[in-house]
Amino acid sequence: MNHTTLVYITFGIVLIIALILDLGLMSKKGKEITIKAAMIQTIFWIGLSLAFWAFVWIENGSEHATKYISAYLMEWSLSIDNIFVFILIFSAFKIKKSDMGRALLIGILLAIVFRVIFIAVGIGLIDRFHWIMYIFGFFLLYTGIKLFFQKESHDANPQDSKFFKWIQKILPFSHVEPKGKYWIRENGKLTFTILSLVVIVLAVTDIAFALDSIPTVVSLVKDSAEATFSRTDIMIIYSSNIFAVLGLRSLFFLLKGAANKFTYLQQGIAVILVFIGVKMLIEFFKIHIPIFISLGVIVFCVGVSILISYLKSHQKKAMPSK
């Protein structure tokens, strides 16, 4: 058994045990998740992710371990931005706090299934047509510049979206109080409750975010545009994505009261996307930026944006009201 196979097996076992613990012990149906519980779950998922990072380091060396932690931190920082949208979705559909935890978990598990499919397709296409990496580079460069100057749009109503109106036409939905149920029988017919609709919206929303995050993570892990993916590279892409997304639910309950304090995180993420877009494009000229520099840029940009957000928030509190 080689190192990569051992890492795959270990990741699978750890993931199954973690999900059993999360579903069975930490996520009881109809139970409201408190700040204390969210803190314990956040520590659990971060600790598990860091333990796997140490395992990758021991089994595959420092370079692969750095790729993993860079990809994980990138996904984790993007997850904080997702929280704004998730708060908006739960508020728009008036979901009870006791139903949020399980709905968010199911939505995230669905999102993981779609991400696995997208990653598999993306890796297959990139290995066959390496020039796709340059298209991703232009896409991330454009997205980063647009995101940097874009005003926050967290006031939009999900119920006004085209997807919401489309899904209501093709699936039978009931507007009665769900009481923790995802489908009920109404007039003898099986209909979906608003909780089911929220789960679908959460999964689709995460897929939209994945359009930025997956190319970003792929570019961090791939050694160069023309290089083929190794089995270890593929494992790192999957594991960093899955660990970061699974930790999103506990992070949501931990930060939902303070999400609006991360005012400049959007700009920090935008700078990272521009950097990675440039990194992908200059590969055309055989210029390769080492993964250690990419990790430093991610940590610096996220750290500085959170620090500036914190300082600006305290500055506003200190200003005397007129």
Image: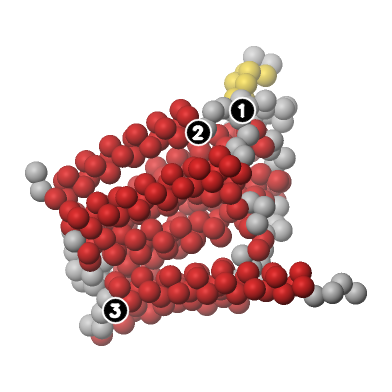
Residue at position x 36%, y 70% from top?
A: 295
Mark 3 residue type = Ile
Task: Residue 113: name its quadrant.
Answer: top left
Q: Position of residue 302 (x, y in %)?
A: 49, 69
Q: Give the residue furthest to the top.
A: 188
Question: Any mark on residue 30, and which?
Answer: 1
Quadrant in which the N terminus is drawn: top left
Which residue has dot 3 on it?
289
Q: Quadrant of the C terminus?
A: bottom right
User: Which amino acid is tagged 1?
Assistant: Gly
Residue 50: x %, y % from top left: 35, 53
Q: Which amino acid type is marked by label 2?
A: Met
Residue 71: tell me if it is visible: yes
Q: Name the secondary structure under disc 1.
A: loop
| Position of 172 relative to 66 (above/below) | above
In whole angstroms, how far apart are the C-alphas of marks 1 and 3? 48 Å
Within 10 angstroms of label 1, few (less than 14), some, or many (20 or more) residues? some
CA gap, disc 1 and disc 2:
12 Å
Of the image marks 2 and 3, the number of the one nearer the N terminus: 2
